[in-house]
Amino acid sequence: MQSQFELMLERVFLLINDETGESRRFVIKMGRPYWTEPEVEAACPIIIEGLLDRQQEIFGIDPLDAIEMAIKFLNSFLSERPATEKVCWSTGDPYFDNEQG
């Protein structure tokens, strides 16, 4: 079951190509979590505009767990970018501590 996307929060990032110096903006949007089956499973919808433009449903045992799983998914997805791409805050500062500017 897919919910209507009800925006809960969003965050703007930059993706900087170390080889070319080019940067592009992308936005993570997290929707309000919802029960897929009451008291059994919940889902948290997310969209990564500019990188993964389709809605993903991330599941958990309750709405809070679904949010936690969505954050883990997002961090994993962002950390798996090619070595030539650096994920940065909208200020240009590296998002991950181990990335050097």
Image (cartoon, rainbow, N blue to C red):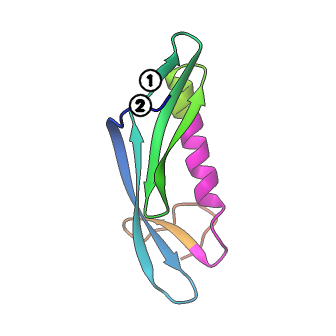
Q: Residue flagged by tag 2: what amino acid is it?
A: Ser
- Looking at the image, is mark 1 or mark 2 earlier in the sequence? 2
Please tell me whether residue 19 belongs to the stretch shown in magenta.
Answer: no
Counting other residues with Cα less than 10 Å from the Cα at mark 1, is it few (<14), some (14-19), or many (20 or more)?
Answer: some
- CB under 8 Å between discs 1 and 2: yes
Residue at 41% over, 74% down? 24
Counting other residues with Cα less than 10 Å from the Cα at mark 2, is it few (<14), some (14-19), or many (20 or more)?
Answer: some
Q: Is residue 21 above or below residue 49?
A: below
Q: Is residue 50 above or below residue 67?
A: below
Mark 1 lies on residue: 34
Residue 80 percent across, percent down from the top left:
66, 61
Numbered badge on residue 3: 2
Read off the magenta span: 69-85
Is residue 72 toward the left or the right of residue 90 in the image? right
Residue 34 percent across, percent down from the top left:
44, 23
SS at badge 2: loop
**Quadrant of residue 31 within the rendered picture:** top left
Q: Is residue 73 above or below residue 49?
A: above
Cα–Cα gap, marks 1 and 2: 8 Å
Q: Residue furthest front?
A: 1
Principal secondary structure, stretch drawn in magenta? helix
Please tell me whether residue 74 belongs to the stretch shown in magenta.
Answer: yes
Residue at 48% over, 19% down? 35
Residue at 61% over, 55% down? 77
Residue at 51% over, 11% down? 38
